[in-house]
Amino acid sequence: MGDNNNLKGKVLLMGGVLGALTGLGIAYMLLQRSEQEGKEVRLTTGEGVRLGLLVLGLLRQVSELGEKKEKV
């Protein structure tokens, strides 16, 4: 039982670290783009919606990892 809790903790910690690093990378890219264009960092509503849908798609793909596909 203790090993299972230890594994859960490691998985949650790793997921949190990866999520934070991904977020920092995206923020860095946005800042770089805005500096190159000489503009403020702005996301339009359309860009926000697209980004949200991409994140949802990514979460769906991750949730399906390891699932066995049934052959029809």
Image (tube, helix red, strand yellow):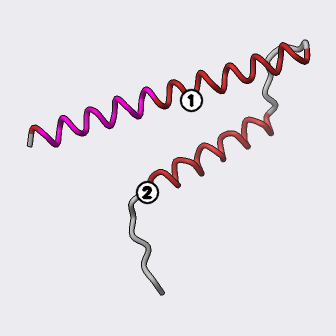
Highlighted magenta segment, given as a residue range:
3-17
- What is the crowding at mark 1: few (fewer than 14 residues within 10 Å), some, or many (at least 20)? few
Q: How many dots with numbers?
A: 2
- Please state if 13 lies on the left or on the right of 35 as rendered: left
* Residue 65: image tag: 2
Element at label 1: helix
Give the quadrant of residue 25. Answer: top right
Q: Residues within 10 Å of mark 2 (few under 14, many from 20)?
A: few
On screen, residue 44 above or below 61: above
* Up/down of 62 relative to 32, above or below: below
First-in-chain label (1 vs 2) = 1
Q: Position of residue 43 (x, y in %)?
A: 78, 27
Check residue 22 in the rendering and tell me which mark sits there, or answer none: 1
Cα distance, mark 1 to mark 2? 19 Å
Residue 4 falls inside the magenta stretch: yes
Q: What amino acid does circle 1 point to?
A: Thr
Magenta stretch secondary structure, dominant: helix
